[in-house]
Image (spheres, rainbow, N blue to C red):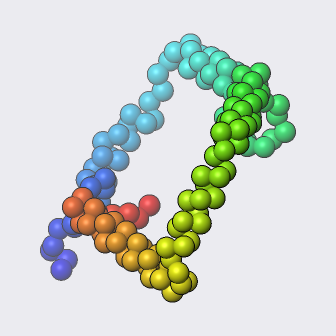
Amino acid sequence: MANQKEEWLPGQLPAEDERLLEQFFMAAREVEIADDGFSQRVMERVLAETPSAVAAPAFAGLRPSRAQWLSRLWTGFCIVVALGVFTWIGGWHYVLVAVLGFLSHVPTMGQMVQLMLCGAFVTMLAVAEVLRREHITIRSLRV
């Protein structure tokens, strides 16, 4: 078994290739290119212009920007209007009719459980087929 080559997996290099690439780029990693502080100025400007939620840890007590605040306000307004229109045109009646119609066609809880199990089984078969077609194995999913 020691003479067998490692199985190549998509998105993963064999250990020998990984080592060779690491060795090849080792010298380039140690070289610093003189740019008169250009890189540092660019990074400072990017951080200054980046929204606070991205540049700082989440929920750090920072106020949202004006654009974020307006976006949230607009989203809330649209949700309220959509719910109002839905109620005005009698949408809840249709939801209730659909739920009651579904429940009337599933007379026992046992049949509902059977339907859910069948759906789960079909989903598992579909996922397994996709993984097989794409040559994805559990080993290739390791991080």
Report whether residue 115 is seen: yes
Q: Is residue 130 or residue 60 the one in the foreground?
A: 130
Residue 108's place in the image compared with 73, above or below, is: below
Q: Is residue 10 left or right of residue 48?
A: left
Name the residue at 44% across, 77% down. Answer: 115
Q: Quadrant of the C terminus?
A: bottom left
Q: Seen from this angle, which residue lies furthest left?
A: 3
Q: Is residue 5 left or right of residue 18?
A: left
Q: Is residue 53 or residue 132 the one in the foreground?
A: 132
Q: Is residue 5 left or right of residue 19?
A: left
Residue 70's place in the image compared with 107, above or below, is: above
Q: Is residue 50 or residue 95 the one in the foreground?
A: 95
Name the residue at 30% across, 46% down. Answer: 21
Q: Position of residue 113 (x, y in %)?
A: 50, 81
Report whether residue 68 is seen: no
- Image quadrant in which you'd find residue 65: top right
Number of callouts: 0
Name the residue at 31% across, 56% down. Answer: 12
Q: Quadrant of the N terminus?
A: bottom left
Q: Position of residue 101 (x, y in %)?
A: 54, 65
- Image quadrant in which you'd find residue 24: top left
Name the residue at 33% across, 66% down. Answer: 127
Q: Position of residue 18 (x, y in %)?
A: 31, 53
Residue 20's place in the image compared with 84, above or below, is: below
